[in-house]
Amino acid sequence: MKNSVQFLNSGLLLFFMLVSTITSAVDVSVTTFGITGTGDESGKLQSAFDSVAGTGNTLTIPSGMTITVTKNMFLYGSCSIRGLDVNNSSTIQCDADLNNDLGRQYWISVGINRHKGNLNPVAVQNTFNGSIKDLTIKATSNAKFNRAIFIFNTNGTTLDNVKFDFTGGISNPPDCFFGATESGIDSNWEPGGPTSMTNVTIKNSTINAKHSHTDSEGFGLANVNTVLIDNNSINNIGDDPIGCHNLTNVTITNNTCSSIDGRILVNNCTNATISGNYVKRVAERETTWYGGGAMIYAGLEKANAPAPGNITVTNNTVVIPSQVNSYTYGIRLLGVRTATVSSNLLKMDSPCGGCGIRIEADTSEPSWNDPAIPQLDPDHIARPRQITISSNILGGAYPGEIAQTGGNFPLETGNYYTVQNNIAGSYLWYSNYCFIYNDNILDYSDDLLDGADYSQSGVNLLAIKDPVNIYSDTLSNVRPGQTVPGTIYTATLAGRISGYNVASLSQTITGGFITLQLWKNGQNIKLTTISAGGSVNLTYNEADLAFVPGDQLQLKAVGASTLQPTNGISVNNVAVEGLQTTQSACYKFETMDNNIITDSSGCGNNGTVNQNHTGVMLSTDALNGSYSLDFEGNGEIDVNSSASLSIADNLSISFWIKPHAIPSGYATFPVCKWTSTITTDANYVCYFMGNGSGGQDGKLRFLATTMNSGWRSITNNSSNPIPSDGQTWTHVAMVYNSATGGQLYINGLQSGAATPGYGTLVTNSQQLKMGTGISSMLNAELDDVRIFNRALTSNEITNLSKYRNSIFISN
């Protein structure tokens, strides 16, 4: 019986404890404290904060109510603040210069109950645990403060659906510097010394600002373990829209950020993920533009904090508009230990240029001491280690480079840098232990978002540090004040000049110098000087000078008037080096001016709408969000024959197709270089089989005539028809090598059996045609038709087939 009574008493105690727990957290309206939404209600609101502190209760603000305060506020203990309108009509606004109260530094302090100089009651740290939700926090034209919310001490703070409205505030830097949040330690403000803060979440919130490039910030946090900043919209911030300092386990995802001079910044952070964000530079008050250094940035900041480590930057979109007036980095990592930068899209339109992705040692903090044991960098320089850069697209009018600075890189065995499967304007990498794979692609054309070249050329970058020699020349008898021109070289392939190498001079120069000039099509596009001193070996890595087939390149040497000796000097074996492309034609179908279809490969193979056919029109229903070409009725595009289109040895053809219906009759030809009347002169033909083809309807087949075997099928048809529903895009590619044979690819995958090589192909003088047919014309849309004069690798075919679907084009 005694045990039963004890059990009953224990059960009752547990019941009352549960009831107490359940009923302790309640909603309390601010109206309970006499708040009406009129006049200055600073004291009443602070009393309300004090009342709910430590209770776990939620202080609610009625819909449409605006509470005006003119003093610093303190929120602490276990409690929450919530507006009763998810559309943020519940508002707390600051309407005063807070310097007249306790100071402008922080408006609402979280985790302390008073400023330490305010002794009634005595200021103490009081850990905050709770949420701020469904509110507008506003600055009026009278407001002056630096941070709306400063978190001093928390073991769980959530901001959810909070709108920060700073558009009415008049900034006056550095005295008034509007920012949404910050956290950390400020010994001039709080008592008690450092704290250990955990679990801060900022989500679904908005910041609207309208200030200069020096006087507003977004969400800032420091000295917190476990942070989530997710799905926020941060608009027209002057400085950093998101600034993270000395955080551990931070996730920054799906935010839209526009700033005048800022970036997503993680300094001295470890285990940081920056993913799915849209980051754009905007003008100050819609007039003045700034570069701002970088759009996504990780580096050092504090003397004794750890170097940033385990950083992941993935699936972000970075936009640098054409109006930006200074060199700007897209993604910049300084001194990061272990990082992955993958699948980011950088739209770089500024003519001032910028490095798309840059990795470098951080020498900016000379007092930094590596706290790692043992120290990896005892000399105060944080060195990057174990970096992977993969599957990024650097697009825009000025695509930028993937680069590493030349100095201060570690040379330890096992420390690696991997650069793989990217598209960029250039690749500059000087470190040992660097693996630059041959599936990187060079792009030098134009805007990837606006119908540009998604994989310009498929360049094999087998040796970035040792480019191929495009041509070599020897310039003899260079004299003072005289120019010696070399032989004109006409480019047969497209590519980029990466530098030139002077092997030697014929005799020692005892004074003066020689200027070496590189000319393209009659214009001097690059020069350098060879100083006195004899034999030299000069290699430059400019990687910003493009050429296309037919461009004329020439070297010239000019002797300075002070050149000694006065007799002639020979500059021997000047090798122009570069990375070459192999595209013969590229049709992106972005314009159709006067029935002309532009070839963007640089080879000049423009097409014309055949006037005997009708029904060719631009369509906005394109995979890349811009235009495609819609063939209706009996439409056809004709391209005059040229040497670059008549390909005998190695050939690749790539295009996207969206059929509206299976052709009637035997077949139509999406791409064809053939008369279509005889079978002995077909250079290459793509068949899209019709309903009169004997059961092959809806399938694709490539055929051609080889020199020694006559009419041959280069690859077998696909095992299944491609969709012809007028909705589905399919990527098609064919490669042929005269020695090893051919293969058809559907959506990047091999389709049908490979065909053995039957030798070189027959070439002809027939037009290249798109959209023609035997008994009917192509009833389909085409996009991004490319012809290469080499056999692409399977990785390159995969690249061509996937980029449009894997990167955030819709942004």
Image (cartoon, helix red, strand yellow):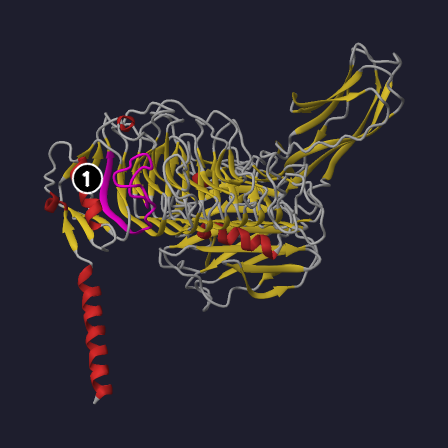
- Residue under the image location 33 percent in, 42 percent down: 233
Q: Nearer the viewer, residue 682 or 382?
A: 382
Q: In this image, 481 relative to 85: left or right?
A: right
Q: Nearer the viewer, residue 12 or 311?
A: 12
Q: Against 603, is 506 above or below?
A: above
- Is residue 671 visible to us here? no
Q: Nearer the viewer, residue 241 or 255?
A: 241
The quarter of the image holding the N terminus is bottom left
Majority secondary structure of magenta residues: loop
- Residue under the image location 22 percent in, 43 percent down: 135
Local SS, label 1: strand
Q: Residue 805: where, in percent of width, then height?
A: 44, 52
**Which residue is at the far bottom?**
1
Q: Residue 559: where, in percent of width, then height?
A: 79, 15
Q: In this image, 454 relative to 624: left or right?
A: right
The number of numbered discs placed on residues in the rendered structure image is 1
- Is residue 42 visible to us here? yes
Determine if the magenta segment contains residue 724.
no
Magenta residues, as a range?
Answer: 111-138
Q: Residue 105: where, in percent of width, then height?
A: 34, 32
- Residue under the image location 23 percent in, 82 percent down: 6
The quarter of the image holding the C terminus is top left
Determine if the magenta segment contains residue 114.
yes
- Give the amino acid type for the residue marked by disc 1 in the picture: Thr
According to the picture, the residue beneath numbered tag 1 turns out to be 91
- Residue under the image location 50 percent in, 53 percent down: 801
